[in-house]
Amino acid sequence: MFRNDVAQSSSLDPVGTPTRAQNYGLHSKSWVSEESRLDVQVSVHPGILIGASMRTNLIRVAKRIARRIIGRPIVGRSILVYHRVARVDFDPWNLAVTPNEFERQLCKLRSKTVLPLREFARLHIENRLPRNAVAITFDDGYACNALVAAPVLESFGFPATFFIVSDAISRAEEFWWDQLELIFHARGFEYQTATHLLPNRAETKRYAALPDKRPLTPFFAMWALLRDLSAEGRRRYFDQLRDLMGLKSELRATHRPMTVPELRTLASNPLFEIGGHTATHPSLPTLSPAMQEQEIVSGSRFLEAIIGKPVRSFSYPFGDWGPTTHDIVMRAGFECAVTAEHRRVTASDDQFELPRRQALSRNARMLEKEDIPAASN
């Protein structure tokens, strides 16, 4: 799951505004680039005739202005990241792409050189990466990755890497942010009561007075408070809060992680690679070096035991990493690692800090654009 580079989306939200967490006055460091969704069109009143030269100049000027304002579309050397291929009612981080939209986006990638991630990284290191190269990745390990996305990818013959939270595979429960959604929308939810139960009282005081009264402000405040709890701490908290509210734990078919058999089937397809995404999806830089190594290594070893193959690529949870995290991943034997920085890959990028671009539900058109720099980078 992304924390910083994924903004939410109502149909009116432009990409390039701060993430919704920022809009609600909560901690977040990055913005999503505007380039994801906007296409520029130049229109002239039908009653006015202009020459071809003037029309060309107008379009050129409009594109130049647009690129200054909204940036360039996703093109060239890019690693795309998906999370869910599903229709959902609540998606504050814009992590879900509908099945139809996913297929349309893959159609647009037919003009690209779609590579397995590790091959993409290897060619990048060797300075031989094609200028229109694209790699496809998925984070977290939702069941829809195996049941919906994988068959569509296979029909196109496109490779993809699936980064799996190992703890999610071993437990029959939803990801913690999805559990929070259920509780937040349940009848009887009260923010003050919910925060009072949290163990990190010092942090809770920071959010005692919400920055505004918009409907999702309590949700984002709760998300921020729960994010840095341990996995067991969150489980105890949710159990206590559900008991107080008279709720039962649910495992929705639309939100569940994939099962062990589904993971094995996915990994058995030669088009697909399984990557590490830690054991419990923590923000790694908040942990001690020893705990970071435990999360990174144990998560991958668990996956290797299930699929019978080595795990050689890694995705930083929430896109959070630092020099210590980088070094642990490198020493652990991974060949590459990806971040949540929303931009294309450039020649100077470290193989353990490769940026990715979030694929959103309304950017199928932008994937077909060719905007390759004149000089090879």
Image (cartoon, rainbow, N blue to C red):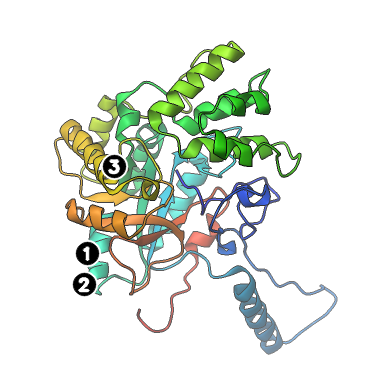
> Could you classify mark 1 by the number of other residues whose Cα lies within 10 Å: few (under 14), some (14-19), or many (20 or more)?
some
Q: Is residue 8 above or below residue 225?
A: below
Q: Secondary structure at mark 2?
A: loop
Residue 343: image location, x then y, percent = 46, 64
Residue 341 falls in which quadrant of the image?
Answer: bottom left
Residue 285: image location, x then y, percent = 38, 50
Q: Is residue 156 above or below residue 74?
A: above
Which of pointers 1 and 3 lies earlier in the amino acid sequence? Answer: 1
Marker disc for residue 291: 3
As measured in the structure, the alpha-carbon distance from the residue carrying label 1 to the one carrying label 3 is 29 Å
| Residue behind mark 1 | 122
Q: Secondary structure at mark 1?
A: helix
Q: Is residue 9 above or below residue 219?
A: below
Residue 165: image location, x then y, percent = 33, 37
- For image coordinates 32% across by 60% down, the residue present is 323
Q: Amino acid at mark 3?
A: Met
Marker disc for residue 98: none
| Residue behind mark 2 | 126
- Quarter that holds the C terminus: bottom left
Which of pointers 2 and 3 lies earlier in the amino acid sequence? Answer: 2
- For image coordinates 61% across by 14% down, the residue present is 245
Whether pointer 1 and pointer 2 mark residues with C-beta atoms closer than 8 Å, the reply is yes
